[in-house]
Amino acid sequence: MIFYAKSIRRVEIVLVLHGSRDPRYVESVDMFAKRLGLRYVFLKDLRREPGAVYVPIFVAGGGDYRRAAALSGSSVPPLARWPGFGEYLKALGAGIYIFHGGDDEEYVSDILSLGLPYVFLEGRPSIGSESCRDVGAPVVLTRGVIYDRIEAAWRRAGCRGRLLPPLFEQEGFASYFSRALREVLLATGGDPKQL
């Protein structure tokens, strides 16, 4: 996705992601970015280039998001604060939404703001037999270590319901993301006449 900034110069959008050595994670990010016509970079490899807008892609705020936003010079918020993200998740129809978790206040606040029934892989409330539902939604971007850990915890808790795929593999997420990205970029300083 390319848009033109106010000075009528070409600006390329680059997604900034945490990164992982897991080949499934890398493959999933690569396919998602290609589908949308975007470039991506992992946080450890981030070297800002002139003429590019860097967009940190993290589910919620927290230390990793703050680091990515600072290194990328971005004011784009995490997905939990994007317009329609909570509604997108709600429309998945899951009985429980499973987030990576942690104890960072910003992260927890972002998750609470979504108004969804939730548990954390790490932190409280955590995945237990009381969180078992017919459908669970791991709210992670890709397959890989974190998705595997969620799946293992779900099964260990005795949950027999199905787990939805990660966001980047959901058919509707690419459409949602593309629409919402445009809105977010406009809200953080883009010129609607130029996008």
Image: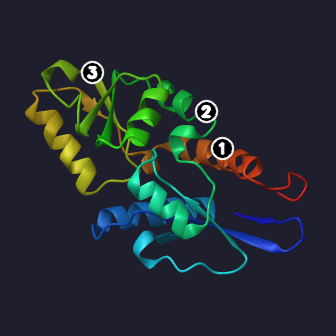
Query: Where is residue 163 shown, x and y percent of the image?
Result: 28, 35
Question: What residue is drawn where x is 27% and y is 66%?
Answer: 22
Question: What residue is drawn where x is 37% and y is 53%?
Answer: 142
131 left or right of 19 in image: left
Looking at the rendered structure, which numbered label has been put on residue 84?
Answer: 2
Question: In the image, is residue 20 above or below residue 86?
Answer: below
| Amino acid at pointer 2 | Gly
Question: What residue is drawn where x is 60% and y is 41%?
Answer: 176
Looking at the rendered structure, which numbered label has been put on residue 28?
Answer: none
| Amino acid at pointer 3 | Asp
Q: Are marks 3 and 1 in contact (CB under 8 Å)?
A: no
Q: Secondary structure at mark 2?
A: loop
Quadrant position of residue 124: top left
Query: Where is residue 177 shown, x and y percent of the image?
Result: 60, 47
Q: Are marks 1 and 2 in contact (CB under 8 Å)?
A: yes
Q: Dot 3 corresponds to which residue?
A: 134
Residue 114 visible at all: yes
